[in-house]
Amino acid sequence: MRIWNGELHPEFDVVVVGSGAIGLTAALTAADAGARVAVLEKARYLGGTSAVSGGMFWVPCNRRMAELGRTDSRDDALRYLRAVTAGRTADDVLAAIVDRGPDMLEFLEHRAGLVMVPMDNFPDYHPEWDGAHPGGRSLDPELYDLAQLGELAESLRPDLRLPFTMREYEEWRIFTRFPMAELQARAEQGLVARGRALVAPLITACVDAGVTLVTECGAERLVVEDEQVVGVVADGSRLAARAVVLTCGGFEWSPEMVENFLSGPVQGSCSPPHNTGDGIRMASKAGVKLGSMREAWWGPMVLVPGDETDGAPTATLLRFERTGPHTVIVNRHGERFVNEAHNYNDMTRAFHLFDPGAYDFANLPAYLVFDQRHLDDYGFLTHRSGQPTPPWLTTAPTIAELAGRLEIDPAGLEATLERFNAGAREGVDRDFHRGASAYDRYWGDQHAAHPALGPVETAPFYAIEVVSGVIGTKGGIVTDGDGRALDAFGAVVPGLYAAGNTTAHPMGPGYPGAGATLGPGSTMAYAAGRAAITQLGLGAVTG
C-alpha cells in the first residue's frame, strides 16, 4: 500500500474504488462539496485505463462547440443515442448523459483546469444516422506539464507513446508524417497528452481538494448493514464510508467472467491487467442488478511479442493500419467478411460469427494483408520500409506463398484480392462499402486517390493475425440517472453508486463516437458525486 496524499483514516464520507478519470471525477465532485473522500486503487499507479487511452470525451451539446460555429440539440442527441443503444438504456440515464455532460465539462474546467477542445471534423461513429453530428461532440485534452504534479508525477500510470494530441493526429494522420523530433522534445520537457493529460489535472485537483489517494490497495468486498452499504474491506481492513462509488473498470482480465458472459472471445486487450471484475463481484454480493454483461468495447487488435503492461501481454488496437489504402482483412478461407474501415467496436462483432457446421467461429483466425506500397507510404505500427522484417510479420513474394505460410486458402485469397483490387481502382467496394461513410474516409489518407481504398498488388506482401480484442467490458451494475446502484427489483441500494465500465454502461451495445467510454462515464460519475453529497446533506459543488 502507498498513500500519495492525505491519511487513510478508518472512516470517510465517500470512498471511491478505482482511480481512472471517472473515479477521480466522482471524488473531486464530492470533495468539492466538503466531503472527506478517499480513492483506492489496487494497481501500482493512478489513472487506470484512462491514463493510457486517447483521453477523449464524447459530450453532446457541449458549450465549446459554439467556438467552432457548431450547433447541437438535445433532441438530436437523444434520438441518436436511442438508436446507438438499441433501446436498451433507460431514458433517465440517456437524459442524464445529454443534460449533465456539459455541466461536468464546465465543473472540471473550473475546478481542475481541465481544458477539453472539441474536434471540429471528427464525426460520430454513425454519421449518416438520424441525430448524428459531423464534428464537435468529441473533445480532446490540451497538453499538460507534469511539473505541475510535482512528486505526484510518479503516481501517474506511464505511457511510452509520444505526446501528441488527437487534434494533431487529425492533422498529421499518418505516423510516418509525424514530427518525431518535436514530439520527442516534448516528452523530454515533461509534457503529456491524451489519457495522461486527462488524468493528471484531475489528480492535482483531488490533491488540492484534500482527497486521500492510495495505490496498491485493492477493495475486496462491500460492508453492508441493514441493507445499506456502509463501507468497504480493502487490503484486509475495514474502511467505513457513508457512500461508496465503484469505478474500478470491467472484467476483461477475468477469464472466468469473460467465458461466462461475453458474446465473443477475448484474444487480447490494450487495458492494464487489473480490470478483473472486482466491483461487479462485490456489488453482486450486495444484491445489485446486473445488465449488459455480454457487451464490451470491442476492437481488432494485434499481439506483438514483448509488448507488456505491468507484466501482462498488451495488444495494440489497429486504426489506420486497417482503414488506409492497400489493406484487407480476410479469414482462413481468404475471404473478406467486414468493412475494414468501420468503427472498431462494431466491426469486431463480425469476427464472432459462429459456424454451426464447423462448430467454430467462421472468421477466426483473421489476418490483415497489405502490400509493399502500403508499407512504403505508411509503415506498419513500429515497422518502416527498408528495415528488416520483424518476426511478428509474415512476408512473401507472392499472394499464394503468403497464404500458404499462414494456412489461408490461396485460391480464396487470390480471388478476393482480384475482386477487391478491381473495385479499389475505381474507388468503390461493392461487397462491404468501405469508404462510403464519412467516418471511413476520416480515418484514411486524405492525400491518396481514395482515403480508404487502394489495391493490394505491389509485391512483396505482408500479413499479421488480427485478434478479437477489447478495450474494456461494459456490463455490470445497473444504475439510475443519478449513478445510484439499483437492486434486482429496481430499488436504490442505499449508499452505493457506480460509473464507467463497472456499470451496465449507458452506451449499451453501441459506440456513438470517440470518447464515448470516458465522456458518459465521467458524466455519470459527476452525477453520482452530486447524488452522494445530497445523501450526505453536504453543500453544492462549486461548478
Image: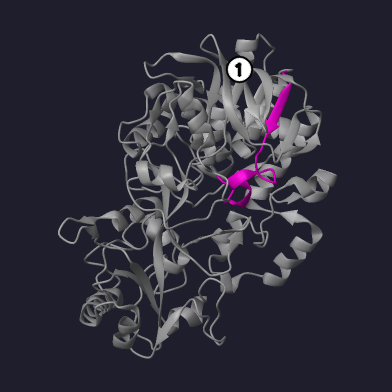
Q: Can residue 183 be seen by looking at this rendering?
A: yes
Residue positioned 32% across, 52% down in the render:
349
Q: Nearer the viewer, residue 226 or 174?
A: 226
Name the residue carrying label 1. Answer: 532
Residue bounds of the magenta highlight: 35-56
**Residue 353 percent location from the top left of the image:** 25, 55
Which residue reaches farthest front? Answer: 236
Residue positioned 53% across, 36% down in the render:
278
**Residue 319 percent location from the top left of the image:** 46, 62
Q: Is residue 63 above or below residue 312?
A: above
**Residue 325 percent location from the top left of the image:** 40, 73
Q: Secondary structure at mark 1?
A: helix
**Is 36 included in the stretch rendered in magenta?**
yes
In the picture provided, is 313 more to the left or to the right than 487? right
The three-letter amino acid code for the residue at tag 1 is Ala
In the picture provided, is 236 more to the left or to the right than 67? right
Say which quadrant the N terminus sits in: top right
Q: Is residue 354 above or below residue 14?
A: below
Q: Is residue 480 above or below residue 252?
A: above
